[in-house]
Amino acid sequence: MDGTLSLVLLLLFLWCLCSRRMERFELTAPAAFVLLGLLLGEGAGVLDLALPHETVKTLAEITLVWVLFTDAARLSFRALRPELGLYVRLLGIGLPLCVGLGALVAAVLLPGVSGWSALYIGAALAPTDAALGATMMVNPVVPAKIRRIINVESGLNDGIATPLVVLALAGVAAAEHHAGPDAAGHAVVELAVGAAYGAVLGLAAGWLLRTTLRSGWAAEDFAGAGVLALSLLGYTSALAIGGNGFVAAFVAGLAFGTTHGAPPRVLLYVEQSGALLSVLVWLVFGAVLLPDVFAHMTWQAVVYAVLSLTVIRMVPVALCLAGSGLDARTVGFIGWFGPRGLASIIFGLLAVEELTPEGARPVLPVIACTVLLSVLAHGLTSAPLANRYGARAEDLPAQDLPVRGMAAGGLHHGRRAGGPSAS
């Protein structure tokens, strides 16, 4: 195991040395570490990542907590105001439509999948991940407004989808153990408790940090470590009082982000920690999860993956943006750049831990196949489609033109697009 750990650390350092150069070849960190996992994993016998289930579960949980908290905490309501109506359409209408359509197609197409399992698939594959289209997100020929819309949607939809994923997993687990409807009702109570507790914790912590920074009690150099601890505190303490930790972390991030008053770099510590764990999740995905999933792959899973990235994503986007003033090409562009990535993988890993092998087997190949196809398809099309779409930027209103030399305001950082962030 020491040799495996050393090799993983070496791979991380080598990627650090050449990451900017790799961007020119359209090779993102997720794609690179999935490929490394496949090449060096169980099949090749180089990486021995046969981790205990508890370790995998802990890795997935901590990564998801940091992702949910930082995405929410970086949200700038002032920056979102100009396109607020579009975000409401995408997150309030488009996301539920995507979950519902995904669940319906899963129930019809996939053998052994119905009810709660179908809802779980629809919800787990609804969140998007801008990191898989990283070159598009930093391409100055794409109008800043469009990059911002895609980025903000991607930063918030995983937190919004999490309650549905938790509820669906509880339903599947209850059906496996013939526990009746009480389990789903208990999950709803946990979600409500987690949301309420997260709001109180985030507001209180944000006010305390702002007050102590202004009074000189808190040192800004240590504030990042404190916020890192706060994000995990929201998760662990919510569990201790009977709430849902993931929802608590997301809501705490939203509340903290509106009140903390600290410089944007305070969140950088949490971002970079989350980025490190996310890379490890991609490596585990390629080395451990994919080989096992390939052994149970079906043609229905492949067809569903194709539909998930096209019809199931793009039709809801088109419907919710109808009448928004965006032209058909822009709507199609936003619809296509809805990659499935880190959040879907973590939801899949949680299913491995929460369900029996028989319960997880019908759903995992679908999630893994969709994410893998997204890594390939969005990685290959990011630059050419961005250049093709951006070529008509001169036809857009002046306020929508790309601002050269500036990042496209949004939420994503190391674990996603690697650059644009909101303050």
Image (spheres, grey):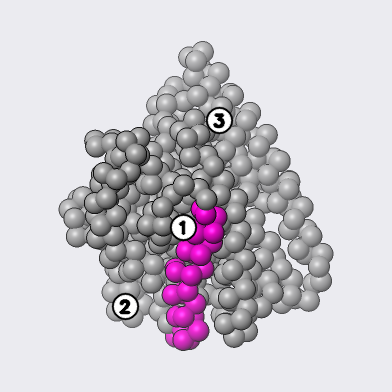
Q: Which mark is residue 258?
A: 3
Task: Let me know if residue 33 appears in the view.
Answer: no
Does the magenta segment cover residue 302? yes
- Circles 3 and 1 in contact, beta carbons < 8 Å: no
Which is nearer the N-term, disc 2 or disc 1?
A: 2
Residue at the disc numbered 1: 128
Which of the pair 351/81 is nearer the observer? Answer: 81
Say which amino acid is labelled 2. Gly
Q: Would residue 319 appear left or right of 187 to someone viewing this image?
A: left
Task: Let me know if residue 96 appears in the view.
Answer: yes
Per the image, label 2 sits on a secondary structure element best described as loop
> Residue at image x 58%, y 76%?
106
Q: Residues within 10 Å of mark 1 (few under 14, many from 20)?
A: many
Q: Would residue 243 appear left or right of 72 to someone viewing this image?
A: right
- The quadrant of the rendering that contains the C terminus is top left
Q: Position of residue 412 (x, y in %)?
A: 40, 45
> Residue at image x 35%, y 35%?
399
Say which amino acid is labelled 1. Thr
Residue at the disc numbered 2: 45
User: Which residue range is magenta in the image?
Assistant: 295-322
Q: Position of residue 158 (x, y in %)?
A: 53, 54
- Circles 2 and 3 in contact, beta carbons < 8 Å: no
